[in-house]
Amino acid sequence: MKLANNTVLGLMGLALLLAGCANDMSDIEVKEGGYVGSAVCARCHDRIAATWQTTPHSMVMKRISGPQDPRILGDWQTPPNFTATDPSGTTVQATDLGDMSKDQIMLTHGVLWKQRYINADWEVQKFQWNIAENFWGPYHFSDAKGPNWQKKCSYCHVTGFNQQDYSWAELSIGCEACHGPGEKHVKAKGLARANTITNPAKLPWHLASDICGQCHTRGKSPDGKAPFPVGYSVGKRLVPSMFTVTSYDNKKAWWPSGAVKQHRQQYPEWQTSSHYRAGVSCLDCHTSHSSSNRFSTRGTGNNLCLGCHPNISTDPVSGHAPIKDAPQHSDCIACHMPNTGKSATVGDERTHTFRFISPNQTLELGGGDLKKQPNSCNSCHYHQKHTPQQLQERLDLAKHRLSQ
């Protein structure tokens, strides 16, 4: 008698669970908080570990071996060239790297948009290398010295962070940053291993997204002392008593429309979206175990959006949001996720409200000035002849013709 394929697979899975991982775990070093490190996780989850190493999470922080380390991306032969303000308030032209030297680098921070450099005193240097554009930019240039990375930045870029003494178990964002401490899991045998580790994929959608939200947001603890959630752990609900999101009145963080202006604010934006109200989580669009594209999305371009919105036409003539006598727009994210944020340079991060920002909002909220309020249309139609006023007139005319 032949068993169905799914029955065979189920029995195989049960057998593996009963047997447990064949690798010896007797030599593991358990760090404070019960963390064992991603290398230990890889002993049983080798395939996942291999693809995880392609993700920005795994590469965001690197300990540097010396000035010739190839993971240092900045060009030390090219001096900076930008106008900045020094600590005295004087405007200066930055044309050299000052005291910053490759010999001083202990850690690199960043692999997608920019890379920053930390020395042995945990001081972040006041220049950053903007990766895509290949030039130096300022970072806290007006301060007497750069911020202390250990106190200001480390929470979101390490695993097993200790909120009392700012120490951690593993540099970069490892397995246990999202799954919680692994000590009980690796020491358990057979069926006893069940429920000894957190699997975000099996959590309610809001709890799974809160794991991402602890870092993909901007704000402080309620007492204003910590730039990270105080008391949060994987699997808990991220609540205001742990963390207060930067107010929408903060003009440095938000555009008047409520779209992101700085970086690292995807979570609070998402909370204002229809995706949030429908229970669409971060993991529905992104994968944390592999990175086949720059932003670790489960699909590319319209393919990702059409997976849930198959009724939306992207036909180049009669598709969604048609404009009379003009080529149609078949790029979902160009309109619904315009480039409003800034990580390294203005517009290199997309908004996660998933709302179309009309030219009318530039006119009403920004007085027609794109520097005061960007919109979806001008993200592409940025030429002088395509003013917000003209683009809004085209949209209004199209709506009028379609209504007849």
Image (cartoon, rainbow, N blue to C red):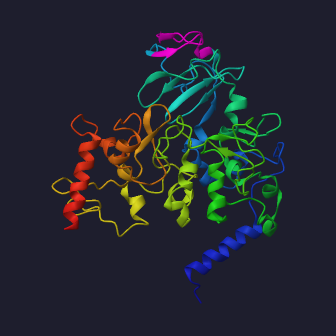
Quadrant in the picture for the N terminus? bottom right
* Position in image of residue 42 (x %, y %): 68, 50
Drawn side of residue 87 relative to residue 40, left or right? left
Residue found at the far left of this picture: 325
Q: Reply yes or no: does residue 96 show up in magenta.
A: yes
Drawn side of residue 400 relative to residue 7, left or right? left
Q: Residue at x 77, y 46 (%)?
A: 36
Q: Is 228 in front, or is 4? A: 228
Quadrant in the picture for the C terminus? bottom left
Q: Can the viewer see residue 328?
A: no
| Quarter-of-image position of residue 265 | top right
Drawn side of residue 360 relative to residue 253, left or right? left
Task: Answer above or below: position of 174 versus 383.
Answer: below
Q: Is 24 in front, or is 98? A: 98
Q: Can the viewer see residue 26?
A: yes
* Position in image of residue 46 (x %, y %): 64, 52
Q: Which residues are magenta?
A: 83-103
* Position in image of residue 161 (x %, y %): 75, 40
| Quarter-of-image position of residue 382 | top left
Q: Is 360 in front, or is 61? A: 360
Q: Residue at x 55, y 60 (%)?
A: 276
Q: Reply yes or no: does residue 383 show up in magenta.
A: no
Task: Answer above or below: position of 396 versus 215.
Answer: below
* Position in image of residue 152 (x %, y %): 69, 31
Q: Residue at x 60, y 54 (%)?
A: 48
Task: Answer above or below: position of 271 versus 33.
Answer: below
